[in-house]
Amino acid sequence: MNAKRYVVLASGRGSNLNSLLGAGLPGRCAMVICNRPGAAALNVAQAHGIATVVIDHAQYSSREAFDAALAEEIERHRPDLVLLAGFMRILTDDFARRFAGRMLNIHPSLLPAFPGMTTHALALASGVRIHGCTVHFVTPDLDSGPIILQAAVPVLDDDTEETLAARVLAREHEVYPIAAAWFLKGELKLDGRHVRYSGPQSESVWLCSPPA
Ligand code: GRF
């Protein structure tokens, strides 16, 4: 059987990209695609020996035109899986539908709480005691797709946005590679809004609380 192939879409710092590429996923990263020239994620990919391409959203007259170019580049690599890793673009419905069931995202909150941006500030302002991150399938509705895996962290009394973000980010780096590996091994099945996991039972306990 041919090795599974995946592509990663990133826009910024690339720390999740780094954890994915360093995790020894059961598949080959065919390309890292970035929408911002000069993004640190490009250097991260190059440090792992992965080819990169920039598709600069500022060069396109509409969201549809950008998404069409992006989709064309992705399809060129015939990926089994598309991973959004800090990809800071709202996707068109058509794009989300085209890659439905084979595109994952990591979001820095325990969805469905705090979709969108500024999740750590919202968590602090709301007074929640537990915050975290979520790996989910991407659907046309922002940050609302079926949830694969979440990890929780405590919110401490003296937390700032920065300290809370750092605690969550460390968990992001753990859970995203786990979820991506499950997908690449064919251990995830979509069942309506639910994701069913069929891998080793010893790993299924991580669904709610991966090892720290
Ligand atoms: C992460 O917090 C991720 O959850 C969110 O964007 C941020 C990207 O950070 N979607 P990095 O580029 O992976 O360091």
Image (cartoon, rainbow, N blue to C red):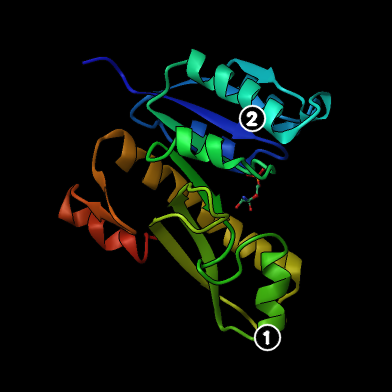
Describe the element under mark 2 as helix, strand or loop.
helix
Q: Earlier in the sequence, mark 1 or mark 2?
A: 2
Q: Amino acid at mark 1?
A: Asp
- Asked whether the viewer can see residue 109, the reply is yes
Q: Nearer the viewer, residue 111 or 204?
A: 111
Q: Amino acid at mark 2?
A: Asp
- Asked whether the viewer can see residue 48, the reply is no
Q: Nearer the viewer, residue 150 or 54?
A: 54
Estimate the x, y position of residue 195 in percent, counting from the top left.
30, 54
**C-alpha span from label 1 to label 2:** 42 Å
Mark 1 or 2, which is nearer the eye? 2
Estimate the x, y position of residue 202 in percent, counting from the top left.
19, 56
Horizontal relation, residue 65 to residue 17: left or right? right
Residue 157's mark? 1
Q: Is mark 2 within 8 Å of ligand 1?
A: no
Residue holding disc 2: 67
Horizontal relation, residue 56 to residue 199: left or right? right
**Quadrant for the C terminus in the image:** bottom left
Answer above or below: position of 149 versus 105.
below
Assess disc 2: are there few (<14), some (14-19) or many (≥20) residues with their C-alpha within 10 Å of its C-alpha: many
Residue 112's mark? none
